Image (spheres, helix red, strand yellow):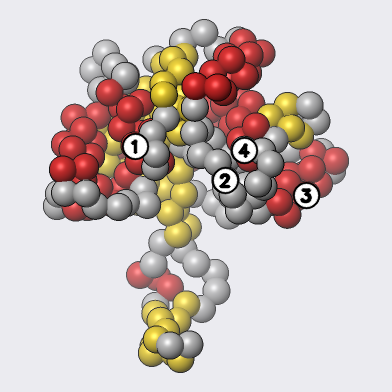
Amino acid sequence: MSNSVSAIIPAAGIGKRFSDKEKKQFYLINDKPILYYTLKALKLSFPFIEYNIGAQKNDFEFIKNVCNDLDINNYKLVLGGKERFDTVFNCLCESSGKYVLIHDAVRPFITKEIVINCIEVAKKHSAAVCGVTPRDTVKQITNYMVDKTIERDKLILTHTPQVFEKKLLEKALMYQRENNIFITDEAMAIELIGYNVYITQSNFTNIKLTQAEDILYFKYLIEKGVYKI
């Protein structure tokens, strides 16, 4: 178990930017929910010892059927929290691996290469995130006026997966919770306690399906045969 990795998939969010009527992780594309494609990609990428999926209680049965459809038997359904980081914390408490990989439920284009690279870096340095350097020029502004242009080589757009040694992430999230600090990803919690987070390469196709327009892109990829279902 010294190198074991648990997968954590927070799937309790409402996703109001996507739709007021349904949760984006359960939106059907070709009769399969987005969560199905994400779990399938993870399953094909690495032999996780378990999948801890954080969700609302009334979604448990739906997710159970998704896992059965994928022949994933080593999963646990965990009650989600108010915020994403609460859901991750609840899942972390149920994880038995030495390392945990956290991945967005609505980021289905993850590749085996990205997953493995992120895990390998985390095993070496305890904390790793994947990301890409911005393609566009980035400017810092105040009151709609440009202050300065920021060097793109010093910036990273972070994606998931993010991989951490479990004990380190437990320490970081306990500190974050005790001090009531709002975080936007788990790497930020690691930063708060003064540990280094190492970067691995992601790619621009590893997008998070956030807007309704993103679904059209997904359907286009399926139609053109770029994404195999």
Q: Residues within 10 Å of mark 2 (few under 14, many from 20)?
A: some
Disc 1 marks which residue? Answer: 86
**Whether residue 44 can be seen here:** no
Q: Judging from the image, what secondary structure is the residue with disc 3 in?
A: helix
Q: Residues within 10 Å of mark 3 (few under 14, many from 20)?
A: few
Q: Quadrant of the C terminus?
A: top right
Labelled disc at residue 216: 3
Disc 2 marks which residue? Answer: 15
Residue 157 lies, in percent from the top left, at 45, 59
Could you tell me how far apart the alpha carbons at marks 4 and 3 are, in whole angstroms? 16 Å
Q: Is residue 31 left or right of residue 204?
A: right
Q: Judging from the image, what secondary structure is the residue with disc 1 in?
A: helix
Residue 87 lies, in percent from the top left, at 38, 33
> Which of 218/2 is in front?
218
Disc 4 marks which residue? Answer: 23
Residue lying at 46% horizontally and 10% vertically, measured from the top left? 74
Could you tell me how far apart the alpha carbons at marks 1 and 2 are, in whole angstroms? 16 Å
First reached walking from the N terminus: tag 4 or tag 2: 2
> Which of 114/219 is in front?
219
First reached walking from the N terminus: tag 1 or tag 3: 1
Residue 31 lies, in percent from the top left, at 78, 26
> Which of 170/7 is in front?
170
Looking at the rendered structure, the kind of residue marked 2 is Gly
Q: Is residue 143 above or below residue 17?
A: below
Q: Is residue 48 above or below residue 201?
A: above
